[in-house]
Image (cartoon, rainbow, N blue to C red):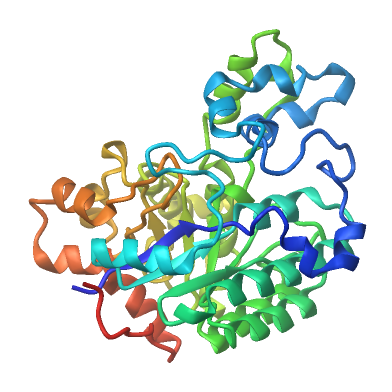
Amino acid sequence: MYVYDVDSHFEPPSDWLDAFPSLKRRLPELFPQHEPEFALRGPEQFAYFVSDGIRPMVPQTDRVPLERLVTPFLRAMYPDDGPATINGHCQHPTVDADARIAALDAQGIAVQNVISGAGYTLMRCLSDPELARDTARALNTYLSDAMSAHRDRLLPVTVTHFDELDWVVAELTRMRARGSRAFHVTTEFSNNIPPFHPDFDKVWSAATDLGMVAVLHVGMMPPRYHPAYSNTDDPSLITRMSTSQSFQAAQVYLNAMVFGGVFERHPNLTLLLCETGIDWLEFAVANMDGRAAPASAALLGPYELPLKPSEYIQRNVRISPLPQPAQSPVRLFETLPGVAVFSSDMPHFEGSLAPVEFWRGELADVDGHRWDAFVAGSMADAYARMGDPLPKPVAAA
């Protein structure tokens, strides 16, 4: 059995910037850069991101104080001496490549994408484009070096900043040589260039030429709500409202990619959605098909692409459910075969340290063909279409 885990996490240690002293001097201690509120690797950072669909929409003077959004569990996750490991789970796990390989062998996972939460946090919180690019490059270098002894199995997801697209192409090229097979995209457009814009085609072309998949992770796609929802003194209302549609920005992005003709112009491109939930996708695709139907032309204008939106989604999009009973991919196996793919989110609290075992139990009634497509086959097909197949390590135990 070959298993490809598309979403796991590692972080650089707290002193990683010592290797980049000039960058260390330039980086601020608090973030976001334009209106600082939190330090990295602390409970306030997590509280900020579970409220950022609403809270940053209002002036700082009108916001519920960030410390009021910090729950007791967040305090336990981030004690004063650094991020905690609780029952093997940790939200900021420091790179330990050998230990991770042992964990993969125990589960029978052959290859794993590795994502840095610090990376996507910094890209969202640095408003200086040059500083963001320099930080992304340094972090990519550090993480790819830290995993280099297992380059055939631990694949760093390249951190990107899209203010300068030629830089993105150069960084993808550099990181592909360092073992990366995927790169982050974002729903926040610092350069005002959406993904369907002709200028963006250079990035999509480079991705397919290099054999790299675009990853839209929940950490790079904040939803946006009306600021009136922040008009409450109940901090839990703010966090519950802010997390009520984690898929919102992903749904809009998919519409842009399909209706903007990106998948038609780049038929071998794959967009991988991570930690967005899964049930929403079936409705979103049906909705796109409806708006592409001839009956909608009078209202919306003609739809002139040769394939239905659902056909582009099935060919060009993959989505990874978290290993949780509420995110079963069984319906998608029927309606959009091949779109749902395996992930562990290891070792985050919402993920699993035994994901193969978990999905074996949840999908016990699924036939072998669908199981194989879920755990590796669909992603292997995506890479093979680009002419650069996934690496095949000797074996996972």
Q: Tell me: 185 left or right of 276.
A: right
Quadrant for residue 240, please give it: top right
| Residue drawn at x 67%, y 42% as measured from the top left | 41
**As rendered, which of 317 and 47 lies closer to the eye?**
47
For the question of whether residue 305 can be seen, the reply is no
Image quarter (top left, top right, bottom left or bottom right) of the C terminus: bottom left
x, y percentage for residue 220?
Answer: 63, 52
Number of marks in the rendered image: 0
| Residue drawn at x 56%, y 89% as measured from the top left | 209
Q: Tell me: 353 left or right of 108.
A: right
**As rendered, which of 54 and 282 lies closer to the eye?**
54
x, y percentage for residue 21?
Answer: 86, 66
For the question of whether residue 137 can be seen, the reply is yes
Asked if residue 50 is positioned above or below residue 145 in the image, the reply reads: above
Asked if residue 90 is positioned above or below residue 103 in the image, the reply reads: above
x, y percentage for residue 148?
Answer: 53, 80
x, y percentage for residue 375?
Answer: 26, 65
**As rendered, which of 227 and 152 lies closer to the eye?**
152
Outermost residue to the front: 81
Image quarter (top left, top right, bottom left or bottom right) of the N terminus: bottom left
Outermost residue to the top: 233
Q: Tell me: 200 left or right of 377.
A: right
| Residue drawn at x 41%, y 63% as measured from the top left | 99
| Residue drawn at x 91%, y 59% as measured from the top left | 25
